[in-house]
Amino acid sequence: MRDDILNILPVGLREYLTFMDLHGLEEIRLRAMKNVILYFGRMRGEYVTDYIITEGQLKEALEYISRFSLYAHEEDIRQGFITIKGGHRVGVAGKIVKENGRIKTISNISSINIRISRQVIDCGKNVISYIEDKHSIHNTLIISPPGVGKTTLLRDLLRLISDKLGLKVSVVDERSEIASCYKGIPQNDIGIRSDIYDCCPKVEGIMLMIRAMSPQVVAVDEIGGDEDIDALMRAKHAGIRLVATMHGDGIEDISPVHRIFKRYIFLKNDSHRTMEIYDENLQRIEKVAL
């Protein structure tokens, strides 16, 4: 296991995991007075260990995660997660503390979810030719159920659009999952021509990027509401190309955004890791391997 993950675990748990096969590990779940659970993705599933995390060890982990300054991460905690070095995302749960009707912070943290960041370089190489459009790209939407890999594909496409196609890319990373910034620096490679607003709401971020960074391409993750769609339409009308993702199972789920995009990439939740590419008329162009 990578040192940046080991170093945030309680010492006792580090020693326990030393002799385990952790190949393909995606998540580590720590819950006070409960068994540690390891998630290995679809191939190996979950593994419930016999290691019980004490309240003291949970606090020990929080100290390591926050570098002994939990207060300095108050804004991150209010959003429910902290991104650590390496781009790994640590989600927290506990007692919600409100002020003036809004979440102020999360106290009495009782659960920690460590999501291990793993970039898959060139997973988009079989796709990039289908979204190219002369000296630019087609507006492209990636659709899949949760956990199938749409953010991973988006990340690599942005790298290719920036480095191979030479386009200026502006990324609005609302949940800090695309670039996985640590102290403002992307821990994932999103290309040399990419700029990023980290932990920024999509609507505000899209407008800020248009005004400030003169992008040729704007990228966002997990669009959903009418406000997201309106912001994307405004970017489109400004002549900016778009790359986005959304949750969905098939063509029937894209009706709200059909007027925006010209390429649709559907990731299939199957063992073959395939994706289907459709044009603006929802005619299938190709089926390729991820």
Image: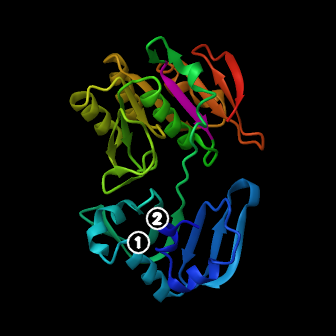
Give, as a single range, the part of the protein colored magenta.
Answer: 138-144
Q: Are marks 1 and 2 in contact (CB under 8 Å)?
A: yes
Place of residue 69 in the rendered image (x, y in percent of width and height, measured from the top left): 29, 75
Amino acid type of disc 2? Val
Residue at the far right: name it.
271
Q: Secondary structure at mark 1?
A: helix
Residue located at (58% from left, 20% from top): 129
Q: What type of secondary structure mainly makes up the magenta span?
A: strand
Which quadrant of the rendered structure holds the N terminus? bottom right
Residue at the far left: name it.
212
* Above-or-below relation of 117 to 258: below
Q: Which residue is mark 2?
A: 90
Residue located at (45% from left, 56% from top): 87
Front in this rendered view, residue 17 or 259: 17
Looking at the image, residue 252 sits to the left or right of residue 141; the answer is: right
Q: Which residue is mark 1?
A: 65
Q: Marks 1/2: CA distance?
A: 8 Å
Mark 2, Cα crowd under 10 Å, few <14 / some 14-19 / many 20+, is: many
Q: Earlier in the sequence, mark 1 or mark 2?
A: 1
